């Protein structure tokens, strides 16, 4: 009945079991046998050599990555509604020691080559302005829109032509891949670093920072330690990440959440503010209509005046969301 956030969902039983199985003495910090497998296992998933760091939060994953890509006097181009702009309390500036976020526009919180180029054209090539070093995209976006592999590749090509790094905030990366029914490698071609979401997809407290550009990864372990994210019992985080990608649990969970969202979306009709491509639904909802739904036991976030956000999670089945879909239809 609660559709606030996938952050609030239960931990998947397989993830919990992995935590239990890691509960015996091993090496501390990241010297354990679980952490030692991350590069190989995620490398196999993406079909290339990678460097993987576990961190406990998505904010840390995003901002440690950005700090590797951007000097304090440089800038990061992101959507004006991106998570790093609206929901991380200035953490990108903190981790990068002052790098500037430059906002770009785009439908459903997605950037395009055109919107990125428009920002770049406004930056004078002189010492008086912060020069762009990174483009950061969010997949799926803050409004549940998914970048296709072709869209990522096109943005990547633009970044390479301009000498820019490309970061992907993948807090809901699993939902994006499940939506596109594509190989995960196709979704990250040309991406230099990815924040691979786990917590929103059934994890407890582990996210994966994945570097595809191995040169960028060389100092990242020091940044993680200095930022206070090198946990002494890191094996519990590594165990969660390994369990998440074993037997494609990450995709199974994302498909469940996406399917649940589509059931609700089908009931919303012209209330939908954006196409539903992952597990977030944004709808027009008056104050009275919201009160009516809450009186029936449903709850969610108000999203500005006359709008609401509904988020489904890995544990939602059709029977869990059909009552909400029916209630919306009956408004």
Image (cartoon, helix red, strand yellow):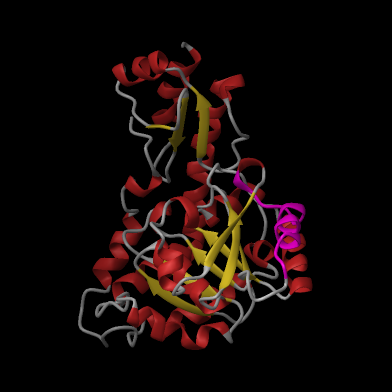
Q: Is residue 266 above or below residue 71?
A: above
Q: Residue at x 61, y 70 (%)?
A: 130
Residue 125 colored in magenta in the image: no
View extreme (front): residue: 128
- Judging depth in this view, the residue of 318 and 50 nearest the camera is 50
Q: Residue at x 42, y 52 (%)?
A: 87
The residue lying toward the viewer, choosing from 42 and 211, is: 211
Determine the residue positioned at 64% across, 78% down: 48
- Say which quarter of the image contains residue 322: top left
Residue 243 is at least partly visible in this image: no
Any part of residue 32 in sight:
yes
Position of residue 156 relative to residue 38, above or below, is above
Q: Quadrant of residue 20?
A: bottom left
Q: Nearer the viewer, residue 94 or 175?
A: 94
Give percent across and percent down for residue 82.
53, 52
Left or right? Give the position of 4 relative to 285.
left
From which residue to which does the magenta span run?
109-124
**Which secondary structure class fits the magenta region best?**
helix
């Amino acid at each position: 009945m609660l559709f606030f956030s996938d952050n609030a969902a239960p931990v998947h039983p397989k993830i919990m079991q992995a935590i239990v199985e890691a509960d015996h003495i091993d090496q501390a910090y990241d010297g354990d046998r679980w952490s030692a497998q991350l590069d190989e296992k995620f490398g196999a998933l993406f079909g290339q050599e990678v460097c993987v760091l576990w961190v406990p939060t998505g904010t840390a994953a995003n901002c440690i990555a950005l700090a590797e890509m951007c000097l304090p006097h440089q800038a990061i181009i992101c959507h004006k509604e991106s998570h790093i702009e609206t929901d991380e309390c200035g953490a990108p500036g903190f981790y990068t020691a002052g790098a500037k976020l430059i906002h770009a526009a785009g439908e459903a919180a997605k950037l395009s080559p055109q919107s990125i180029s428009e920002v770049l054209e406004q930056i004078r090539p002189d010492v008086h302005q912060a020069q762009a070093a990174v483009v950061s995209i969010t997949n799926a976006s803050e409004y549940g829109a998914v970048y296709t592999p072709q869209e990522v590749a096109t943005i990547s090509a633009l970044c390479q032509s301009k000498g820019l790094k490309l970061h992907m905030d993948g807090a809901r990366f699993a939902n994006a891949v499940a939506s596109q029914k594509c190989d995960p490698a196709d979704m990250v071609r040309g991406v230099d670093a990815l924040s691979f979401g786990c917590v929103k997809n059934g994890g407890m407290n582990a996210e994966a920072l994945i570097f595809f550009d191995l040169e960028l990864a060389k100092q990242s372990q020091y940044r993680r330690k200095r930022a206070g994210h090198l946990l002494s019992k890191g094996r519990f985080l590594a165990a969660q990440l390994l369990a998440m990608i074993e037997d494609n649990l990450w995709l199974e969970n994302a498909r469940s959440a996406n399917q649940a969202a589509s059931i609700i979306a089908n009931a919303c009709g012209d209330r939908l503010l954006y196409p539903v491509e992952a597990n977030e639904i944004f709808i027009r909802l008056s104050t009275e209509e919201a009160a009516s739904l809450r009186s029936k036991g449903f709850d969610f976030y108000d999203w500005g005046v006359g709008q609401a956000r509904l988020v489904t999670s890995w544990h939602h089945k059709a029977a869990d969301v059909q009552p909400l879909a029916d209630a919306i239809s009956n408004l």
